[in-house]
Image (tube, rainbow, N blue to C red):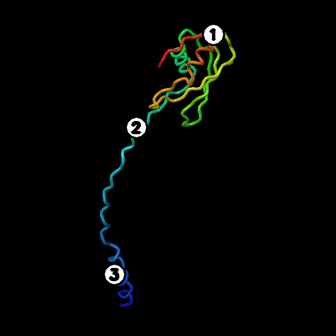
Amino acid sequence: MKKLALILPLALLAACGEEPAPEPTPTETATPEPVASLPATDQAYFSTKFAETCEGAEPVKNAVCRRAMGAEQALCEYGLGEDEYMRHEATLVANEDGSDWMIENAEALCAEHGAHHKAS
């Protein structure tokens, strides 16, 4: 009888916890919009961008560009022609739609190196 008195409350307690859980309500997930990513600002990229922008200038021999994570500008130091030293600086800034870089103040930069600025 004592065993029955102990088992009965346990059976009742176990039966209470067996209610079906409510079904989860479906939620709409927002689809993230594609983010335009800027190309890496390495030496090859800067050399090409400089040649496209400043037609007639000496070719870039060496370049180092630094960009803070997520920044919309990069500072580049570079050397031209046979110069082994990086004596010049240029700033790359994101274009209007954020899909590519352009040289900030390109007209003055190209004039400094005796080149013709190409309108981009």
Q: Is residue 46 left or right of residue 24?
A: right
The residue under label 2 is 34
At which x and y percent is residue 65? 60, 26
The disc at residue 12 is 3
* Mark in front: 1 vs 3: 1
Q: Choose top left, top right, bottom left or bottom right for residue 59.
A: top right
Q: Quadrant of the N terminus?
A: bottom left
Q: Earlier in the sequence, mark 1 or mark 2?
A: 2
Gap in Å between the C-alphas at discs 2 and 3?
55 Å
| Residue under the image location 52 percent in, 16 percent down | 53
Q: Tell me: residue 100, above or below residue 8.
A: above
Gap in Å between the C-alphas at discs 1 and 3?
90 Å
Identify which amino acid the numbered label 1 is placed on. Gly
At which x and y percent is residue 67? 59, 31
Residue closer to the observer: 54 or 99: 54
Identify which amino acid the numbered label 3 is placed on. Leu
The residue under label 1 is 81
At which x and y percent is residue 22? 31, 66
Residue closer to the observer: 21 or 40: 40
